[in-house]
Image: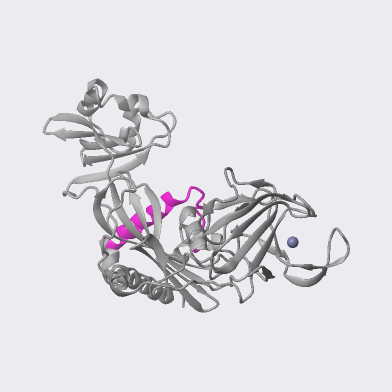
Amino acid sequence: MKMIKICAQALNRWILTQKSTVKASDSRRNGMVATLLILSFGVATAFGLTPGTSLSPIPVSAVIEDITRDNLTPTETPGIYTQQDLVRSGDTLASLLFRMGVDDRAALDFMRTNAIAKTIYQQMSPGKPIRVQKRANGDLISLRFPQSDSHTLVVERLGEQFQAASVAVGSLRRVVQTSGTIESSLFAAADAAGLPDNVTHQLSKLFSTDIDFHNDLRAGDTFSVVYEAAQDDFDQVKPGKILAAEFVNKGIPVRRVYFDGPEGGDYYTADGVGSRTAFLRSPIEFSRVSSGFMTMRLHPILNTMRAHQGIDLAAPTGTPVVSVANATVTFVGWRNGYGNVIELHHAMGIDTVYGHLSRIATGLHAGNHIRQGDLIGYVGMTGLATGPHLHYEFKIAGIQRDPQGPEVPRIASTNLTGRAKAQFMSATAPYITSLNAIRGLALAKFE
Ligand SMILES: [Zn+2]
């Protein structure tokens, strides 16, 4: 049990390092979070993470016991204590080490005189981490301090001597699992679950073909995420890409898994159906529909009855607008009423139109081939517009349709088959196991 307690502290610490704005009084946090660090896969530098590393499907209870911090200090010998702290303003090396329980005159003398070690005196700025190993009597065993993004200063005791070296930064690949429940918004829930912003963005993008995060979210919706991260020598964790995720919206679970397939890495449904060529629900990440698709409406400026052959998405000026699918750019420029407008041509005889833009993305021209999710421009109110919004049209065979209607193809049938399917199933099985495990844990916790 003691082991598990240490793990929980490590976990909390890990979560704290994820969010710079964590409120210490967020008592909901513990109740909301079911986070596990599972397994690490040896050393990889930064994000050159080994692709296709397999995750053994380990039962959750065992996984929890695996969460120890000593991957970095595998020789945790009795009588030696590891401690980490941050440099504070006004710290001298002596005061910092003293605060960490190191009382070692010989070590300080060495660091003052050794050419490599003494660099720490110029580099001690507030907020930098420092990690020491020490004996109970205060003797320094080792010290690690970041010199740059790529190098760490390591000072080690050898008997009664010390040595110093500047070593390349190593990082451990971690796979992190988190789940959360929506109470008000995706971002609030993600915050409560300790999910890094970068991962939250990936999550909303991943499910944007299935869920309109403004209109479809319900209190009680849940998400589970498995993502990779790189943990450096000081336990600072940089999140990487999502490996698998589940979103349960209005009781219906949707899953996506990452697979490095024949055409490169991409996301698939759990059955191996690719979703890349589907059309995003919205070309803006967060917005609200201020005017829907209507055959007739009173035009707000012209004051006459006209059809509204698209939808208006209200969003602040400057909000990024992305392509809803892979496309060829067919028009970029000014058109009466539309202001700055972009037209894109997609597969299946589909065209999309983006109007009232304040700006066009740099370098975007007719004839460009772009991918789903690429930035094309920014929300504005050029042309006939009463306020900043995106006028968005969706045309099938030249005829405007409701972009949120049932005619819009959500998922194209890019099924994996044969050998690729078999590889997919075996590569993603551990992620599915993880999702099932998190879900079980979340249910046990919240029900
Ligand atoms: Zn409009």
29 up-or-down from 359: above or below: below
The quadrant in which residue 274 appears is bottom left
**Nearer the observer, 352 or 58:** 352
Residue that extends furthest to the right in the rendered view of this protein: 303
Q: Quadrant of ligand 1?
A: bottom right
Residue 334 covered by magenta stretch:
no
Screen quadrant of the N terminus: bottom left
Residue that extends furthest to the left in the rendered view of this protein: 159
Residue 183 x/y as whole percent: 57, 68
For the magenta stretch, what is the residue range? 1-28
Q: Left or right? Give the position of 68 relative to 354.
A: left
User: Which residue does the image show at 47% across and 53% down from the upper left?
Assistant: 198
User: Which residue does the image show at 27% across and 39% down from the upper left?
Assistant: 132
Residue 388 x/y as whole percent: 73, 53
**Nearer the observer, 265 or 143:** 265
Magenta stretch: dominant secondary structure: helix
Q: Left or right? Give the position of 420 relative to 288.
A: left
Q: How many marks?
A: 0
Residue 59 x/y as whole percent: 27, 72
Query: Is residue 196 in view?
Result: no
Residue 404 x/y as whole percent: 64, 71
Query: Is residue 42 in view?
Result: yes
The quadrant in which residue 313 appears is bottom right
